[in-house]
Amino acid sequence: MAFEVEGKLHRLFATEQKSASFQTREFVLEIPDGNYPQLVKFQAVQERCALLDAFKEGERVKVSFDLRGREWNGKYLTNLNAWRIERAGEGEGQENAGSEQFPADPFPNYTDAPPATGNFDDLPF
């Protein structure tokens, strides 16, 4: 399953060499969520660790990631495995660069719905 999210690069960590053939690098994204922004940690592995070298803390980025989960010693662990990182607005017109891409109203417009007749006895239960 692939997901995408945009936010501000809040924190970049150094690459960690976990074994002779495996490395990881973590970073934290600040995602707008009303009055309380969410700080979400992602992980890049192997050659994708180098993708983060092109970014600085404070930049707006778009992250493509997969959910990864596993069980270890009776505990369940979840990782957000980043596989693509790009500047927010990249590939779009410059007028949209850096602007937030959130819908103005997440709820559908029901003004075109037919008016209620007052007869609500047509329910099948």
Image: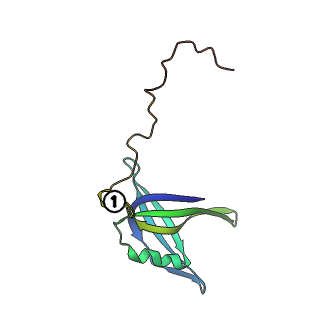
Q: Where residue 3 sits: x, y (%)?
A: 53, 58
Of 94 and 66, the residue lying toward us: 94
The answer to whether 124 is drawn above or below residue 3 in the figure is: above
Of 12 and 65, the residue lying toward us: 65
Q: Report the number of discs.
A: 1
- Give the image quarter of residue 75: bottom right
The answer to whether 102 is drawn above or below residue 55 in the figure is: above
Colour convention of the picture: rainbow
Mark 1 is surrounded, within 10 Å at the Cα level, by few (under 14), some (14 to 19) or many (20 or more) other residues, namely few
Of 14 and 89, the residue lying toward us: 89
Q: Where residue 92 sits: x, y (%)?
A: 37, 60
- In-image side of 63 versus 124 (left or right): left
Q: Which amino acid does label 1 sit on?
A: Gly
Q: Residue furthest bottom?
A: 20
Q: Where residue 108 sits: x, y (%)?
A: 46, 35
Residue matched to label 1: 93
Of 97 and 7, the residue lying toward us: 97
Q: Quadrant of the N terminus?
A: bottom right
Q: Where residue 27 sits: x, y (%)?
A: 45, 69
Q: Which residue is drawn at 40% across and 49% down?
A: 102
